[in-house]
Image (tube, rainbow, N blue to C red):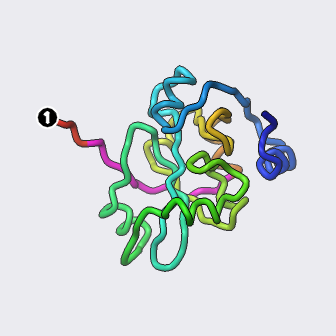
Amino acid sequence: MPLNERLRTFLDSNHAEFTLTTHSKAFTAREVALAERLPPREVAKSVVLFGDAEYHILVIPASKLVDFQELRQALGLSQARLATEDEIGRLFPDCELGAMPPFGSLYGLPVYLDASLAGEPIIAFNAGTHLEVIHMPTAEFRRLATPVIVSLVREPALHHW
């Protein structure tokens, strides 16, 4: 499957350093990490947030969850919620639902990178489908996406049954 045209043009025009891999369908960032044989801390998931009448892309490790209290404080938002599937479909019409790449400039959205990912040497993320993953040096991602680096996440709670 060819790389999404909008994403390919963006990467090529910016002379981006990246590799593209293909794997069997993976719908969650943790499944992507498993399919790509990567630690979940290196796999980024793009979380779309609606806060104070604007959409934002949060880029967080596959192994973490958004901490909404921390998020509202870090971004100076009075209210915030996850975008709905319908909203995501409208914002990213050329991507499979839930597989949007974390380049907000392609979609007119600001990008926030969690501080824990900013320190990783390599970052991997969906390339618009549930089959393709882009791998690139985190410094390269930061150059291309120009994200604001903030603390956005918490550890998932452990379930005790």
Task: Compare residues 99 and 76 and report the one nearer the observer.
Answer: 99
Q: Residue at x 56, y 48 (%)?
A: 98
Task: Compare residues 35 and 125 and report the one nearer the observer.
Answer: 35
Name the image quarter holding the C terminus: top left
Question: Measured along the vertical axis of the image, is residue 40 above or below residue 140?
Answer: above
Q: Residue at x 85, y 44 (%)?
A: 12
Name the image quarter holding the N terminus: top right
Question: Measured along the vertical axis of the image, is residue 27 above or below residue 46?
Answer: above
Task: Describe the element under mark 1 as helix, strand or loop.
Answer: loop
In the image, taking residue 20 as reference, residue 35 lies left or right, namely left
Q: Residue 127: which quarter of the image?
A: top right
In the image, taking residue 34 as reference, residue 134 lies left or right, namely right
Q: Residue 67: which quarter of the image?
A: bottom left
- State yes or no: residue 150 in magenta: yes
Residue extending furthest front?
A: 86
Give the crowd class for mark 1: few <14, some 14-19, many >=20 residues within 10 Å: few
Task: Compare residues 12 and 133 and report the one nearer the observer.
Answer: 133
Q: Residue at x 60, y 65 (%)?
A: 110
Q: Residue at x 60, y 39 (%)?
A: 125
What residue range appears in magenta?
145-156
Q: Position of residue 33 (x, y in %)?
A: 51, 28
Q: Which amino acid lies under the numbered mark 1 shown in the image of this protein? A: His
- State yes or no: residue 161 in magenta: no
Q: Position of residue 78 (x, y in %)?
A: 37, 78
The residue under label 1 is 160
